[in-house]
Image: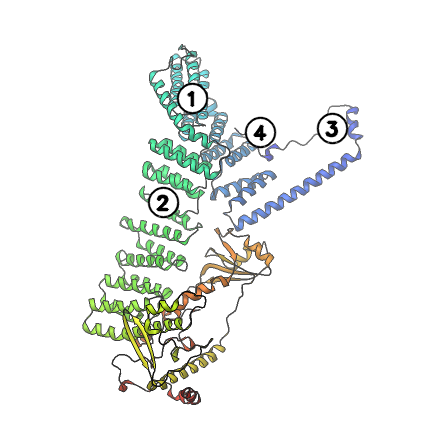
Amino acid sequence: MATEEELPEAAEVSPAPEPAGGGGGDDAEMPDAAAPSGSDSDSSDSDSDDEGAAADDELRIQTLEQSLREQPLDYETHVQYIQCLRKSGNIEKLRVAREEMNKYFPLTPKMWQEWAKDEISLSSSDESFGDIEKLYERGVQEYLSIKLWRDYLDYVEEHDQSVSQCTPSGLSKMRNLFESAITAGGLHVTEGSKLWAAYREYEMAILITIADANDEEREKQVQRIRTLFHRQLSVPLTDMESTLSEYKSWEAEQGNANDPGADFDGVPSNVASAYKKANDMYNERKQYEDQLSNAGTSEADKLQEFVKYIKFEESSGDPARVLVLYERAVSELPVSSDIWMGYTSYLDRTLKVPSVLRSVYYRATRNCTWVGELWVHYLLSLERIRASEEELQHVFERAIQCSFSTIQEYLNIYLTRVHGLRRRISDGLDFQLIRQTLTDAAEFLSSQLDTKELLRLYAYWAKLEHSLGKDLSAARGVWENAIMKSGSVFEVWEQYISMEIEMGHVHEARSIYKRCYSKRFAGSGSEEICHSWIRFEEENGTLDDYDLAVKKVTPRLKELMMFKSQEEAKVEAYPNPNDNSNANDSSQKRKPSKMANKQQPPAKKRKENPPKSTMPSNDQGSNLQSGHSGAVTTVEVGEASREKVVASMEMKVDGDSQIGKSSSNEPKPSFYNDKCTVFVSNIDLKANEDDLRRFFSDIGGATAIRLLRDRFTKKSRGLAYVDFSDNKHLEAAIKKNKQKLLGKKVSIARSDPSKGKKSREAGQASQDNLPQSSGDDAKATGSSGPDNEVPKGDAKTTGKNTCFAPRAVVKPLGWTNKDEKKPDGAGELKSNEEFRNLLLKK
């Protein structure tokens, strides 16, 4: 039972003092009349102090209310708000605040005790009994607390008229309540005996009230008490010896004499046997209980002790004892996801009782909302017990509104929902539910998932559209949408083609190859798509189809091979000065043919920091070698091709100047140096700039907010940059890290763009510098679609960024002089006659 000090301050307000002189004579009034004037001054000072404290409390309450409106899922703010309202005595607001907190979070047993005691102290009639009884019932369902159960039992026994009058309905109600308490906590090793004792005391009080009843009724009540003793003596609890002694004394009072010095004299043999077994069980568990009762044990150590204890109980094979131990663990460690995961997994494996599973999973996800795996298991468990679609939909919607640490957890919840809908589609569910769920998942996750997981989502979606939705155009639409968003990812095209091939659509697969073989892909994707097309035609096409594929991809492969050789030559021409290893030896081992000529070909001259290079002599020429799949292609550049090299260089110079002219007329993008900026991530996708401005309004100093949005959908990506006026405000903003904005914990860190610059340049260099084929198919198919656009920030392979040799230098196999045509733009070359002559002289 709670002590008097635990009662709320609102209930401790004493009546105002009556005026002096109520029962005394003049002498009694004199002290007040003759009181020094200083007492009035002290009283006025006290009143002013009280008024100031009340004003401070009211201001504090208003501040907390504002915080809860902005962040309704802030647990600590709810607790502080309730404490301030209890102190102020505003009972109406206090009720609303408690209900609002319990809507989002479970309340601790102490908070339920305070709530019930506040209501009891304010109740003036029996009409409030039902409401208070419901409060207790809600409290004991959230956590196992022997104290709260005792308060609940005492309240009903004292305030329920049917119970206090010992009516048949009252007796039945009270006994059922005691049995519920025994079921919940009667196996609690250290505190369960308190519930057993309270149950026996109640039945003994009933025996006294029926002392004048007939012998049969009295004997029936005696037997009920005896049964309670026998049941308790078979349970391993503390103070079992005192319970046995109490039982023998009670039996002696009923006329059954026994020897107090002998342990089991007068005790039935079956009860003695059960007692010995229970005592042995208690001795086995005593070491675990001693560890848990250690006051200096940290939460981490207590968790480990509970885990050991639970494993021991599970090996004993008694589910009831395991459940009580789990309830004890979650009551002491309510936000330990390991405990809740173990508890729910045990129930799924062993008990499988629908009502228990629902209750435990509901409480688990209220205590650990941020654990995605718990939500996944919750949905699967509901599906196993044949829960309704409405219940599953409700749990799923609760799950996706939570804040998780990784995007993978959101994906798992979405996929679990889709898997469940797929399994139950035969029950009459509409396929539109699956389609809508996948649409929502793609819209929410596509900007944050990595390529592998995104492909998994799209592939599964397209498969379901074809197999369950029976809509081939919708399946293709899934991949077309993926290409619009990630057309530069090789695996997206590969998966699209694989789907068409698996369905036997050879013509459609060939059309996709024609669309993508000339695209730029990271790594070796550009070569792989070309070789994949050749293999496809070998296995599925006619000879004409095969010849056409070879004709298309051969120039592209040569182009890529030239690019690789020039990249390797560039590395050899500019060795890393920090590399002290024997680079010459290693390069000779790998490519001995390149050591004889380290100079760059003319077409590879760079504008920035140009090296001192010489044109190849008339008789020697220049050899460029590039290897692909073991083959080596040698391109001779001699006197005959020098004119074309110069012409191509002039075209490049002209192109650079044209690009410079065109770009100069375009508005320049804003440049941010991020000197006093924070980077905010994990933002709720519904949040906008105004929400971020309000989030930082308490610290002030925000000068600009840049919310990053998707290039195509224009929707928020959950990321933002916020500029501040000075470092003082910047540091204050960083301290708001992990605070919640619209229910999600945001991550805030100082923006430092220099950190990722090198890694970004290195990661993009290989892809951005890859040559983009200018073949006819690249122009004819999908040239106007979004997948053919160069993303912002990517270097276009035109002008000075074109690193591969001009096509005029690289002659395809079978080339003759008859095939040579006058190059486009020949008229423009005449305007550069002076530049050509200068180069020829050199």
Check the image and name the residue furthest to the left: 543
Q: Nearer the viewer, mark 4 or mark 3?
A: 4
The residue that label 1 is drawn on is 240
- Neighbor class of circle 1 (other Cα within 10 Å; few <14, some 14-19, many 20+) is some
Location of residue 508 in the rendering, given as x and y in whole percent from the top left corner: 25, 67
Q: Are marks 2 and 1 in contact (CB under 8 Å)?
A: no
- Which residue lies under the disc numbered 4? 4
Image quadrant where one finds the C terminus: bottom left
Q: Does the rendering let one see residue 700? A: no
What's under tag 1, amino acid-wise? Met
Q: Tell me the residue at 45%/32% (across/down).
A: 291
Residue at image coords 27%, 64%: 497
Crowding at dot 3, Cα within 10 Å, few <14 / some 14-19 / many 20+, comes out as few
Q: Nearer the viewer, mark 1 or mark 4?
A: 1
Residue type at numbered disc 4: Glu
> Residue 377: which disc?
2
Q: Is residue 182 above or below residue 409?
A: above
In the foreground, 441 or 28 = 441
Q: Secondary structure at mark 2?
A: helix
Instruction: Return the x and y of residue 753 as percentages of the image width and height.
Output: 50, 63
| Element on which disc 1 rests | helix
